[in-house]
Amino acid sequence: MGKYQLDSKGKAAVTKYHEKNKPTQFDKKQHLEKLRAAFLEKKRK
């Protein structure tokens, strides 16, 4: 057994912490759509 063994309550707390502090997922399709819209808007002027 490890020195710092977590019980189920501790594991749940760690999981919750990591989910909250996880960086937001980068959405490539949404980003490309935004860039395309900005380009078309600039081109129109």
Image (cartoon, rainbow, N blue to C red):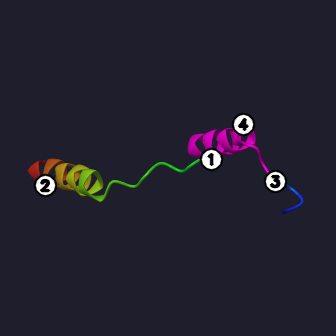
- Range covered by the magenta-colored residues: 5-20
Q: Which residue is mark 3?
A: 5
| Left or right position of 20 against 40 | right
Q: Quadrant of residue 13?
A: top right
Q: Mark 3 and mark 2: span between their CA atoms?
A: 60 Å
Residue located 78% across and 48% down the image: 6
Name the amino acid, label 2: Lys
Q: Mark 1 and mark 4: span between their CA atoms?
A: 15 Å
Q: Position of residue 15 (x, y in %)?
A: 62, 45
Q: Mark 2 and mark 4: span between their CA atoms?
A: 56 Å
Question: Which of marks 4 and 1 precedes in the sequence?
Answer: 4
Q: Position of residue 27 (x, y in %)?
A: 33, 54
Q: Are marks 3 and 2 in contact (CB under 8 Å)?
A: no
Residue located 86% across and 55% down the image: 4
Question: Which of marks 2 and 3 precedes in the sequence?
Answer: 3
Q: Residues within 10 Å of mark 1 (few under 14, many from 20)?
A: few
Q: Which residue is mark 4?
A: 9
29 magenta-colored: no
Name the amino acid, label 4: Lys
Find residue 18 and name its label: 1
Asked which secondary structure carries label 4, the reply is helix
Q: Position of residue 20 (x, y in %)?
A: 59, 40
Find residue 43 and name its label: 2
Find residue 28 and name its label: none
Q: Mark 2 and mark 1: span between their CA atoms?
A: 43 Å
